[in-house]
Image (cartoon, grey):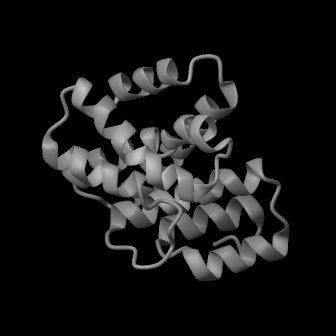
Amino acid sequence: MNTVALEMIKYYAGDVKRINHFMKVHGFAKVIGEGENLDENTMFTLETAAYVHDIGIKMSEQKYNSSAGKYQEELGPAEAETVLKKLGFDEDVIKRVSYLVGHHHTYSNIDGIDYQILIEADFIVNIFEDEIEADSIKSIREKIFKTETGKKILDNMYNTESNT
């Protein structure tokens, strides 16, 4: 995982905000994944996806002058594939991570625990970074969060439930 982290830090050299974001998303994804007892392969894919999930932002800003989620999902998978191939990742991991990168702003038809956890970890970080209001956080919890570990983290960080 350090290889991926260091490659992404190099990819976003000088962009402290983006580096901090993916480092935090990775941290929460790892905690949630371990809390949900993911198997080793799913955990590896999740952690990799957490590091590269926003890799499409750079290209989106260059091509569309926007970091909108739809552009990240459009341009991110090919960029993730390039980086992961360079690092020698197996094709099956590259395929799944590219899929997750291309769908991490799509909250319907979530087709795996790795996808669910990536979205939850990204939301936990984005809620803080975007200073989202309490009512919206409660709505996000109801509509998006499915894992017990993710809910507990959200509840304890943002007082969304009874802090169980």
Residue 138 appearing in the image: yes
Q: Residue at x 66, y 74 (%)?
A: 140
Count how many numbered circles sit on residues in the image: 0
Vertical side of 137 occupied by 65: above or below: above
Vertical side of 128 occupied by 5: above or below: above
Q: Residue at x 41, y 22 (%)?
A: 7
Residue 160 appearing in the image: no
| Position of residue 89 measured from the top left corner of the image (x, y, whole percent) | 19, 34
| Position of residue 158 measured from the top left corner of the image (x, y, whole percent) | 76, 63
Q: Residue at x 69, y 62 (%)?
A: 156
In front of the other: 51 or 160: 51
| Position of residue 42 measured from the top left corner of the image (x, y, whole percent) | 25, 54
Q: Residue at x 22, y 56 (%)?
A: 39
* Residue 36, picture quadrant: bottom left
Q: Horizontal placement of 13 versus 99: left or right? A: right
Q: Horizontal placement of 149 versus 129: left or right? A: left
Q: Horizontal placement of 68 versus 98: left or right? A: right
In front of the other: 72 or 125: 72
Vertical side of 109 occupied by 118: above or below: above
On-image quarter of the N terminus: top left
| Position of residue 57 measured from the top left corner of the image (x, y, whole percent) | 57, 41
Residue extending furthest front?
A: 63
On-image quarter of the C terminus: bottom right
Q: Horizontal placement of 75 versus 46: left or right? A: right
In front of the other: 50 or 76: 76
In front of the other: 35 or 1: 1
Vertical side of 154 occupied by 64: above or below: above
